[in-house]
Image (spheres, grey):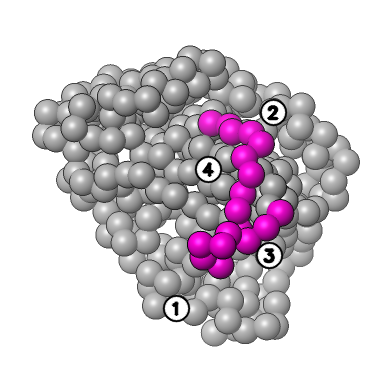
Amino acid sequence: MEHQDKAAINITREALLAAIENMTKNKVVIVGDVMLDEYIFGSVERISPEAPVPVVCVENEEYRLGGAGNVAKNITTLGGKVQLFGFLGQDQAAKRISDMFAAHAIDDCCVKECDRPTTRKTRIIAQQQQVVRVDRESSCIPSDGGMRHLLHGVAEAMRTSSVLIISDYGKGLITGSVMDEIRLICEALEHKPRIIVDPKPRNFPFYNGVTMLTPNTKEAGIDWHLAAGRQKNEEAINEEIFAVGNRLMRELQSQHLLITMGARGMMLFMSQQQAIHIPTAARKVYDVTGAGDTVIAVLGLALASGLDPLTGCLLANYAAGIVVGQVGATAVSPKQLKEAVLTWSLPEVRQIAS
């Protein structure tokens, strides 16, 4: 199939700055897997005599919101409002998360279950490099009672929200039946809220008919057995990703699709056979942790503010460029986002159509 590059789309800094101003105070509802990110920072000066592994001398420890919690933090840091629905245990990790929710003005609507541990990911970092990650989690489906309570809360919350974000990390919350219930909730409302999904590849069949999905290239390509990006030629890579995106849209019947491509930027599918390539805004990359959370947070808040998908993706591209230049999952402030728009190069955005 041959594709035609159309004229570059005109983007102005003034329009993007005005869009940032417009995003504050709007509300987004999030349903997803909440987790605690624990960072242990230290230095390595020797190898262990017990095994060929480094000995890390701990210097500092930090706790941050991860998963759906990081999405929520990104939204409130930008000035938006959030109601967050998920599952936590009744343990110290849940207590830390609840305290951080309060600190970041996140409306905590999570269900607490005593027999379910809070997901915790511990990263040990030395000399600005991750040495190892330790996960403590359960991927079991939550209890029927807990799920009913959560969905009832979602139904009430969506009465006053135009966007619902699904943050699926595959920890048992998002199932086919849960997505069916969420679609019914949104379809029953007169204002027809939009559903945006940060997907887990094995759960792609659950997302049929949503407004937009935001997979990265690996998530999109591996699940559909397409080796996206295997060629070295830049044009051929875009052709491959264009094919991946069109297949995803055809199979899942989503209105839009955003494939994040790391150093190659993003490809936004406005419809089948019509995409827009947005080159990356990142200047340096230290850590991609949480970049997907930032993208869907900015995009969701932009749509809740009445902005179009392209403007939302452009702002998300700048925000992702900021967070990958820092270690660990972080959030972007309006000031940081404005500074990036003002001082970084404007992306050469081009349409790709069949």
On the question of residue 89 being in view, the answer is yes
> In this orientation, which residue lies closer to the viewer: 66 or 6?
66
Residue furthest toward the left? 144
Q: Is 55 one of the magenta-colored residues?
A: yes
Is residue 344 left or right of 292 when viewed as pictured? right
> Where is residue 304 drawn, in percent x and y?
51, 30
Please state which amino acid type lies under the numbered disc 4: Asp
Q: Give the magenta-colored segment's residue range.
A: 45-63
Please state which amino acid type lies under the numbered disc 1: Leu
Number of residues whose C-alpha sits closer than 10 Å to that of mark 4, classed few (under 14), some (14–19) or many (20 or more):
many
Residue with the mark numbered 1: 226
Number of residues whose C-alpha sits closer than 10 Å to that of mark 3, classed few (under 14), some (14–19) or many (20 or more):
some
Number of residues whose C-alpha sits closer than 10 Å to that of mark 1, classed few (under 14), some (14–19) or many (20 or more):
some
**Mark 1 or mark 4, which is nearer to you?**
4
Please state which amino acid type lies under the numbered disc 3: Arg
> In this orientation, which residue lies closer to the viewer: 215 or 163?
215
Residue with the mark numbered 2: 333
| Vertical placement of residue 228 versus 150, above or below | below
Quick check: marks 1 and 2 in contact, CB under 8 Å?
no
Residue with the mark numbered 4: 293
> Where is residue 305 drawn, in percent x and y?
56, 28
Please state which amino acid type lies under the numbered disc 2: Ser
